[in-house]
């Protein structure tokens, strides 16, 4: 009736619906990455993309004289610590959103989503105003006659704090979806059979919630590994992350090939992790809740 | 039945959650205080409150241009990303087709990607194409990141949608467009609405993508950053607070409209 007659091979309805997004991602995501990859093999400090091929940029990065590897170590270490802290911070909240808060969980979720709509530099600058000399913490402690606040700004520790702060929702929500996959009956049955709380957590809850937790950990790791604003605004450049090196190469240094080679290494590390973890996860089950 | 152990752990979970929420909002409050105190340099406890920086910000022509850029970018991003994401969500969740799993994974990649690096990569690509970065290229950059997010938001709604309804409408002789308008869209409406709200707010607050891809054109977050790095004035926290309040009012209005529509539909359904 409303079916159009079928002339020759046509795409399925699903494939047709995916076309606009596929086109956008091809032109806006894959093409830029290909450009970065092409620049990574171009002559250093030139703009001769697609016309020269050299490994000089990588040789410069892996040269023992070059200290750029410290930026990689900083970025990956900070990202790793950020993930560990967020796992501990978010688990009780994600559990609460599923099993404790009841009708309040909607409001709690909104309160955690909202900061995503405030740009991170505004929120990070709020922390500067909190920790700075004569700022909220220092001023409040002096006012109470307790001496001044600790000098924590412009240290690697505060950079990690800022990253934990900014990426909290990216851990919390996947984790919440993961914990939602634990069927209540199963936990009740285990309890009726005499399992202790630790055993239930380790043998039932954790494995069932693992896909969500894994997505959260991965997402925060990847985002934190590429973070730059925290180190600049809160860290006062006491830590140089790899993204900052990439940015400098692209802007002040005007060495696009070197920046691209650095970016390519970061992308390979990050996407390698993302793809391995993603291949083990069934998105239909996590989002579908059927 | 709750055991005493559960009562205690539930209490601790509540206390912890309240503490974390307080920490999440603390810097936003600090910014609001700094924007509302008199004098050029912030000191706590605030000696004297004043609206001088708010009115200066409000009257500044430079700021007007920024707000205009941010609004235009966010509106276009909202419109375009909902269009892309609506079909994307159908492909993601509604149809079972051969490439679906690959499509789902591909869609997540831009979300699983550090935004500053994405911004720099796009800058290179625009340059290779010979495009000068302006607010228009910033829209493209925002879309690359926001369309996947909105697709996921709408897809969650699509998962709860029973395709039999569409088939029934088709069997009763409804055209494809008529089915879309009268069956599919009303059911997916809450997801589309949330998706649109997400798109606007994420674009409004986006900093890393705008920083590298907007060229000489500035947006609110980009301007704030440039002043934080060099040339701080209390207009920075004042404008930051204004921008936050704008986002909060939009979120609130969006939520209220959704509740209102749901109630009205429920009332209508009970009348019939």
Image: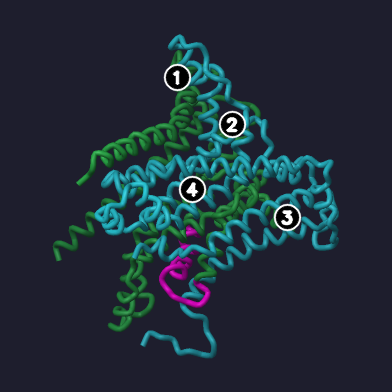
Same chain assignment for discs 4 and 1:
no
Count of marks placed on residues: 4
Q: Please provide the residue range marked out in magenta.
A: B79-100
Crowd band around label 1 with a 10 angstrom C-alpha radius: few (<14), some (14–19), many (20+): few
Q: Is residue B137 left or right of residue A105?
A: right
Q: Which residue is mark 1?
A: B50
Mark 1 falls within which chain?
A: B
Q: Which residue is mark 4?
A: A170
Same chain assignment for discs 2 and 1:
no
Of labels 1 and 3, earlier in sequence is 1
Q: Which residue is mark 2?
A: A157
Residue B122 visible in the picture:
no
From the viewer's side, name the closer residue of A109 and A69.
A69
Q: Residue at x 30, y 48 (%)?
A: A99
Of labels 2 and 4, earlier in sequence is 2
Crowd band around label 2 with a 10 angstrom C-alpha radius: few (<14), some (14–19), many (20+): some
Tell which chain the image draws in green.
B
Q: Which one is in front in this view, the residue at disc 2 or the one at disc 4?
A: 2
Q: Is residue A43 left or right of residue A167?
A: right
Q: Which residue is mark 3?
A: B127
Measured Cα–Cα span from mark 4 to mark 3: 32 Å
Residue B252 visible in the picture:
yes
Q: Are marks 2 and 3 in contact (CB under 8 Å)?
A: no
Element carrying mark 4: helix
Element carrying mark 3: helix
Colour for chain A in the figure: cyan
Mark 2 falls within which chain?
A: A
Measured Cα–Cα span from mark 4 to mark 1: 37 Å
Q: Residue at x 54, y 45 (%)?
A: B206
Measured Cα–Cα span from mark 2 to mark 4: 21 Å
């Amino acid at each position: 009736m409303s079916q159009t007659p079928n002339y020759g091979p046509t795409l399925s309805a699903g494939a047709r619906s995916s076309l606009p997004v596929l086109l956008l991602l091809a032109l806006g995501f894959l093409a830029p990455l290909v450009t970065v990859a092409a620049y990574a093999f171009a002559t250093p400090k030139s703009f001769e993309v697609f016309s020269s091929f050299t490994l000089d940029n990588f040789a410069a990065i892996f040269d023992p004289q070059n200290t750029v590897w410290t930026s990689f170590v900083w970025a990956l270490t900070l990202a790793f610590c950020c993930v560990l802290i967020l796992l501990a911070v978010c688990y009780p909240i994600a559990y609460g959103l599923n099993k404790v808060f009841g009708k309040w969980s909607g409001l709690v979720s909104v309160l955690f989503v909202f900061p995503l709509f405030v740009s991170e530099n505004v929120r990070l600058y709020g922390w500067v105003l909190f920790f700075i000399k004569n700022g909220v913490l220092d001023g409040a402690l002096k006012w109470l006659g307790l001496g001044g606040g600790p000098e924590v700004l412009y240290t690697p520790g505060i950079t990690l704090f800022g990253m934990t702060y900014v990426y909290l929702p990216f851990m919390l929500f996947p984790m919440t979806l993961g914990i939602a996959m634990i069927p209540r009956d199963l936990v009740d049955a285990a309890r009726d059979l005499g399992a202790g709380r630790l055993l239930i957590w380790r043998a039932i809850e954790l494995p069932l919630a693992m896909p969500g937790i894994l997505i959260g950990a991965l997402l925060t790791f990847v985002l934190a590994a590429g973070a730059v604003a925290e180190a600049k605004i809160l860290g006062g450049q006491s830590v140089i992350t790899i993204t900052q090196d990439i940015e400098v190469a692209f802007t002040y240094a005007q060495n696009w090939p070197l920046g691209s080679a650095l970016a390519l290494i970061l992308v390979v590390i990050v996407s390698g992790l993302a793809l391995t973890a993603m291949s083990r996860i069934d998105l239909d089950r996590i989002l579908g809740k059927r | 039945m709750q055991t005493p152990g559960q009562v205690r752990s539930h209490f601790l979970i509540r206390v912890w959650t309240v503490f974390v929420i307080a920490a999440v909002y603390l810097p936003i409050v600090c910014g609001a205080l700094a924007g509302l105190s008199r004098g050029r340099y912030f000191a706590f406890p605030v000696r004297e409150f004043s609206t001088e920086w708010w009115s200066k910000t409000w009257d500044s022509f430079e700021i007007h241009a920024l707000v205009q850029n941010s609004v235009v970018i966010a509106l276009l991003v909202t419109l375009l990303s909902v269009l892309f994401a609506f079909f994307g969500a159908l492909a993601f969740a509604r149809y079972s087709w051969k490439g679906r799993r690959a499509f789902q994974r591909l869609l997540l990649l831009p979300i699983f990607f550090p935004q500053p690096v994405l911004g720099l990569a796009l800058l290179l690509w625009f340059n290779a194409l010979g495009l000068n970065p302006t607010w228009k290229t910033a829209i493209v950059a925002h879309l690359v990141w926001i369309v996947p997010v909105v697709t996921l938001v709408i897809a969650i709604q699509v998962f709860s949608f029973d395709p039999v309804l569409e088939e029934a409408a088709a069997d009763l002789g409804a055209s494809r467009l008529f089915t879309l308008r009268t069956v599919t869209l009303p059911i997916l409406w809450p997801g589309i609405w949330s998706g649109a709200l997400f798109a606007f707010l994420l674009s409004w607050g986006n900093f890393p993508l705008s920083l590298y891809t907007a060229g000489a054109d500035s947006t609110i977050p980009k301007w704030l950053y440039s002043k934080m790095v060099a040339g701080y004035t209390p207009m920075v926290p004042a404008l930051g607070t204004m921008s936050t309040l704008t986002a909060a009012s939009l979120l609130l209005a969006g939520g209220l409209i959704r509740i209102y529509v749901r109630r009205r539909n429920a009332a209508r359904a009970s009348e019939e």
